[in-house]
Image (spheres, helix red, strand yellow):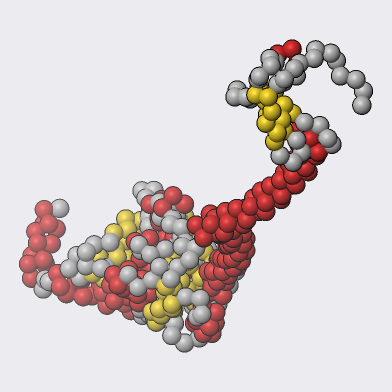
Amino acid sequence: MAVETEASRQTQSTAPAFTVGQVVSRIKALIEAQFPAPMWIEGELSNVSYPASGHIYFSLVDEQLTDRFGQRLVLPCAFYRGMNQNLKFKLADGLKVVCLGQVTTYERQGQYQLKVMRALPKGKGELQLAFEQLKKRLQDEGLFDDARKRPIPALPGRVGIVTSRTGSAIHDMVSKLRGWFHVVIFPVKVQGDGAAREIAAAIGLANRLKAADVLIVGRGGGSVEDLWAFNEEPVARAIAASAIPVISAVGHEDDWTISDYVADLRASTPTDAVKRLVHEQEAFAEASGRLADLLVETMRRALDDEEQHLASLGGRLRLLHPLNQLTRYRDRAYELQLQLSTKMDYTVGTLERGLQALSGRLQALSPLAVLARGYSITTKLPDGRIITSAGRLRAGDELQTLVAKGRIISIVKQTINEPPSEP
């Protein structure tokens, strides 16, 4: 045994030694000869990492087979940045995938690996998985919560549109919005490489310029791939960060995108978004018209009432005007004068008639009238007492007798106290 060992040592010392590089190169050549072309390999993801370099490293684990120690078989994978730029979904541990790649070796560590060119989810479409992953992540962050959504202004003065410069959507929206709003267009790519970045940048620009009161972000219908820009995270983040309320209007009624969930309002189509804004404007215009008519009618009635009140005040003012009052007083004075004159005429006439009656009676009772009928009045001189009784006289008294025409002076010779006899 010792001889064999010694012989073995002599053989080893005389045989040429391989370098590590030679061994690794031979292993690489053997592996690449065994797997000359890229191939599809399916398995479950494990130990997924995203270093700052932009590469993605992970392992593909066989879902069924294990080694002799009961450990699951593992294939290390490298998904370099130049190859993973178009990856729509996020690789995560436990996800079952199918990878297209070249089996090769990583010389620095002497380890075989799969240099991945493309990765697809197993059993589910790549875009569908990417949609579900991003939707769940943003929902967990609260970006879909109703509490953070802003109300769409009922009467925006300016409407911004973030969409393609060409296509039926932009022409349809602009034709319906003009005449109601000031329209600001932010033309962007809506599909293909770079579309999401342009859409997000346009939303940010509209906010920095404060160019609109509401933004419509969207495009017309298309396939899932055509609408994919509105399912990308930069667009969702830009909508969530927008200080301007955003209406998402992507595709047709059945098309739902991430931007629909994040936006403040989802419209089923671009035309529907326009109709919502125009409807509010039309309703406001109609209500304004009704209010204007009501205001005019109310003002007309108020003016009529004020006109009648003013006419009444004018009439009262005319009555209270000094000239009108003087005229009224003059007319009243003239009326009173007429009444006074009438009453005076009546009173004078009445008094005159009464005076005439009294005058007649007085005339009838006047001594002169008695004298005219042949009677006389005798008075004693000098005191002028009327003599009614002869017994009051003495012989020698001087008398004055009044007759109808003239006076008679006489002296008493004798008195006879006897009543007179009838003539």
Which one is nearer the viewer's eye here, 296 or 249? 296
Residue 83 placement (x, y as % from top left): 32, 75
Q: Is residue 249 above or below residue 419?
A: below
Q: Residue drawn at (21%, 67%), measured in percent from left and top?
A: 53
In the rendered image, residue 407, in percent from the top left (x then y), is placed at: 70, 36
The image quadrant where one finds the C terminus is top right
The residue positioned 49% from the left and 63% from the top of the image is 154
Residue 263 appears in which quarter of the rendering? bottom left
Say which residue appears at 12% left-offset and 57% top-offset.
5
Horizontal side of 203 relative to 280 (left or right) equals left
Q: Is residue 66 above or below residue 89?
A: above
On screen, residue 342 above or below 190: above
Q: Residue at x 32, y 58 (%)?
A: 48
In this view, the residue in front, 332 or 308, is: 332
195 vs 262, nearest the viewer: 262
Residue 314 placement, left or right of 141: right
Residue 116 locus on image (x, y percent): 34, 71
Does 409 sit left or right of 225 as displayed? right
- Residue 276, visible in the rendered structure: no
Is 93 placed above or below 22 here?
above
- Quick one: 260 or 154, which is closer to the camera? 154
Does residue 242 appear left or right of residue 144 in this picture? left
